[in-house]
Image (cartoon, grey):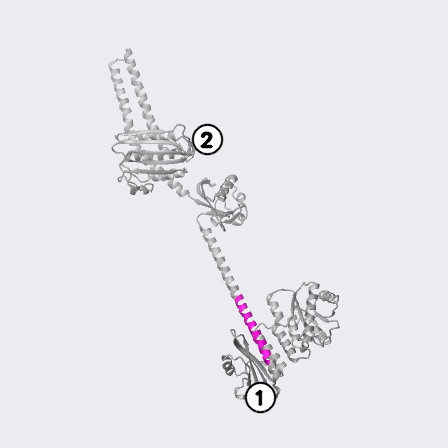
């Protein structure tokens, strides 16, 4: 086989080339135990020397060698006629695609990656030796089969058009014994040419008449052309007598030509024609494969660029999204179903607790939010995951310097894929300015209400003061007359003193009620009685009738449950509604304050029989600064404050009105459940 005649019954000889003595010994033991004869070499010079001394049937060659590396040695061996059919197995430490391509381009028959199992090595060696034996037996002394076998083996390793053209031209030059041989191809990457001259040296396109060749190829020829007229020759050489031009055609397209030239017409016969035609067919197929490989490589490069661009785009989008989240004026974090933090924005990082992002990510909320009650956090997140509802909670925090901050914390369900809630977004918004502004507005409106009530209170106090004054004058007259000596005089004195005391207490009750309403209180929620709040509000409003005939009725259900509220705020809301009702009845009417219990809600109604509200004004009555009163008689803040107080207590406020018949405001507040 290989570089000698067939030796079917003799042991095959394997040449192992590697710098490592340990590896050579291991391969030698594995091959010899399978019946092969093994010779070894350590580098390229010693390998070439052994190859010329021994009849080698198979070569196992390490890719990494000192001096001349394994791939260069492979090319040197393939350049020698004795080694053209010898199987060569490359052993390499890496498995990169580029190295594999380079190995096969150098003429390798196989490529194995170290460490390789002994059984696999022996199996591969046996397969290549058997293939070489069958090829040798098939080719024998047949010149055409031998030529095609050598050419096919060489083209298997050609992955570039330049390699294909060069190998086809060289193999055809030797196989046909032509005096000149040229191969030319035109493809997407441009034109490629190789010419072997009379000395067997490979050159470029200098010896080709390219204009004539291009014109001939433009006609897309399908059959070979035999030229004996030197005026039509395609090679620039005056010594040859005949040219045989074979188109390189694959499918329906001619992409090049193979040209052989002979000095004597008798040197060219049917055998040379068949060899040239077969070589042209091989070359056309190899060029097509090389074109596909180049297209695949371009596509791979384009795909790699596209992937890189898409990756960069996604990364830029991710950074942009993170920048948006980090620059939001709210603190934000996201937890998964295990309550582990997966996102933590910059505002949260710089917040009151000042937890760095890297210390928060991956931890549970209980490990990071240590100042918040564990049970409350777990309950709130569980509710969002189970119900999909948005939870909003107001919280108050105190900084080390004693400053109070108010936060509106929203927990929002998030669905990444499908319908199941996978994450919850927690957003904390600093609403201190809004809360303080709302309280300031409420205080201003309360002062305005106190001012309006004060006029009625003053009028109401005048009555008991007139009684006290009359009693005092009567007593003074009696003293002057000296009539207190008898029993009747003592009784009159007692009566006058009782009137003075009762009227004085009446004044005190009126002023205490006004002072109690105007007094500022801390905003604390406590269980309060709606009935007592309505009664006190009715007493205060009773002084604001402005001589109108207003009938005030208070109707509260027996056993009315309490509500959790700020007593002062709730009283302010009811007084504001009642005051508006009084103003809506300038000619007199009925003001009804009622409370009842319905389905877990305490319902408070403030109704009047006044002028009513026009339909076009109803949608805007709760807007700040909107009023239907004359200029100077209203601020437009009363109903807006009422709306804020009721909603802040978790309740609702509605209005129903008919022009000329009256208006009813309805407040619904959650009732406290008795335990």
* Residue 533 screen position, x and y as percent: 37, 31
Kindly identify which numbered label has been placed on residue 571.
none
The Cα–Cα distance between marks 1 and 2, rounded to whole angstroms, is 121 Å
Viewer-side residue, 239 vs 41: 239
* Residue 391 in the figure: left or right of residue 257: left
| Label 2 crowd bin: few (<14), some (14–19), many (20+), radius 10 Å | few
Q: Earlier in the sequence, mark 1 or mark 2?
A: 1
Q: Position of residue 504 (x, y in %)?
A: 32, 23
Q: Quadrant of residue 459?
A: top left
Q: Is residue 131 magenta?
A: no
Residue 613 versus residue 436: which sits nearer the camera?
Answer: 613
Q: Which residue is mark 1?
A: 241
As drawn, which residue projects farthest toward the top?
Answer: 486
Residue 77 in sight here: yes
Labelled pair 1, 2 in contact (Cβ < 8 Å): no
Residue in the image at 29% along x and 27% along y: 461
Residue 483, image quadrant:
top left
397 versus 237 height, above or below: above
Label 2 sits on residue = 674
Residue at horizontal 28%, vertical 40%?
614
Quarter of the image holding residue 158?
A: bottom right
Secondary element type, mark 1: loop
- Residue 339 location (% of width, % of height): 53, 45
- Type of secondary structure dominating the magenta stretch: helix
Q: Determine the secondary structure under disc 2.
A: loop
Q: Residue at x 52, y 86 (%)?
A: 232
Disc 1: CA contacts within 10 A as few (<14), some (14-19) or many (>=20): some
Percent of width and height locating residue 562: 42, 31
| Segment colored magenta | 276-300
Instruction: Inspect the magenta stretch and tell me whether residue 293 lies in it.
Output: yes
Judging depth in this view, the residue of 228 and 104 nearest the camera is 228
């Amino acid at each position: 086989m290989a570089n000698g005649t067939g030796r079917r019954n003799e042991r095959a000889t394997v040449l192992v080339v590697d710098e490592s003595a340990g590896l050579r010994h291991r391969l030698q033991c594995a091959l010899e135990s399978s019946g092969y004869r093994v010779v070894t070499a350590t580098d390229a010079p010693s390998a070439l020397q052994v190859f010329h001394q021994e009849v080698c049937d198979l070569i196992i060659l390490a890719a990494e060698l000192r001096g001349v590396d394994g791939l260069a040695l492979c090319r040197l061996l393939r350049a020698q006629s004795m080694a053209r059919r010898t199987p060569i197995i490359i052993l390499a430490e890496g498995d990169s695609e580029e190295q594999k391509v380079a190995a096969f381009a150098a003429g390798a028959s196989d490529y194995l990656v170290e460490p390789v199992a002994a059984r696999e090595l022996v199996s591969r060696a046996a397969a290549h030796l058997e293939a070489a034996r069958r090829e040798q037996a098939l080719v024998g002394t047949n010149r055409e089969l031998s030529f095609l076998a050598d050419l096919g083996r060489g083209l298997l390793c050609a992955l570039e058009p330049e390699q294909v053209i060069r190998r086809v031209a060289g193999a055809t030059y030797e196989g046909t014994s032509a005096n000149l041989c040229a191969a030319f191809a035109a493809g997407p990457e441009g034109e490629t040419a190789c010419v072997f001259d009379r000395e067997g040296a490979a050159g470029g396109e200098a010896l080709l008449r390219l204009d004539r060749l291009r014109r001939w190829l433009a006609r897309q020829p399908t059959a070979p052309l035999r030229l004996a007229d030197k005026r039509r020759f395609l090679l620039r050489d005056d010594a040859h007598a005949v040219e045989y031009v074979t188109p390189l055609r694959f499918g329906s397209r001619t992409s090049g030509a193979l040209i052989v030239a002979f000095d004597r017409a008798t040197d060219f016969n049917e055998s040379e024609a068949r060899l040239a035609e077969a070589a042209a067919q091989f070359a056309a197929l190899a060029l097509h494969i090389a074109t596909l490989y180049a297209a695949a490589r371009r596509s791979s490069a384009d795909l790699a660029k596209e992937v890189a661009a898409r990756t960069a785009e996604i990364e830029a989008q991710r950074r942009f999204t993170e920048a948006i989240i980090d620059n939001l004026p709210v603190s934000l974090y996201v937890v998964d179903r295990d309550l582990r933090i997966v996102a933590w924005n910059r505002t949260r990082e710089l917040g009151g607790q000042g937890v760095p992002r890297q210390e928060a990510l991956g931890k549970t909320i209980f490990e990071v939010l240590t100042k918040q009650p564990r049970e409350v956090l777990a309950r709130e997140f569980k509710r969002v995951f189970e119900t999909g509802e948005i939870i909003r909670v107001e919280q108050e925090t105190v900084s080390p310097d004693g400053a109070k901050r108010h936060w509106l914390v929203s927990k929002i369900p998030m669905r990444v894929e499908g319908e199941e809630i996978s994450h919850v977004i927690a957003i904390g918004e600093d609403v201190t300015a809004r809360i303080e502004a709302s309280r300031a507005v409420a205080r201003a409106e309360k002062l305005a209400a106190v001012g309006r009530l004060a006029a009625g209170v003053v009028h109401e106090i005048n009555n008991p003061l007139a009684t006290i004054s009359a009693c005092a004058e009567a007593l003074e007259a009696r003293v002057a007359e000296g009539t207190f000596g008898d029993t009747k005089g003592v009784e009159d004195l007692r009566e006058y003193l009782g009137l003075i005391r009762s009227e004085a207490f009446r004044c005190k009750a009126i002023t205490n009620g006004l002072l109690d309403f105007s007094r500022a209180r801390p905003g604390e929620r406590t269980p309060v009685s709606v009935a007592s709040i309505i009664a006190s509000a009715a007493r205060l409003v009773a002084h604001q009738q402005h001589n109108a005939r207003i009938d005030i009725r208070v109707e509260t259900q027996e056993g009315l449950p309490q509500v959790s509220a700020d007593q002062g705020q709730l009283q302010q809301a009811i007084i504001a509604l009642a005051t508006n009702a009084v103003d809506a009845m300038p000619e007199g009417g009925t003001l009804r304050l009622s409370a009842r219990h319905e389905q877990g809600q305490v319902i408070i109604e403030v109704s009047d029989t006044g002028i009513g509200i026009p339909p076009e004004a109803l949608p805007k009555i709760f807007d700040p600064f909107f009023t239907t009163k004359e200029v100077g008689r209203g601020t437009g803040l009363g109903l807006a404050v009422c709306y804020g107080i009721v909603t802040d207590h978790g309740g609702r406020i509605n209005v129903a009105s008919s022009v000329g018949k009256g208006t009813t405001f309805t407040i619904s507040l959650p009732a406290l459940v008795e335990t």
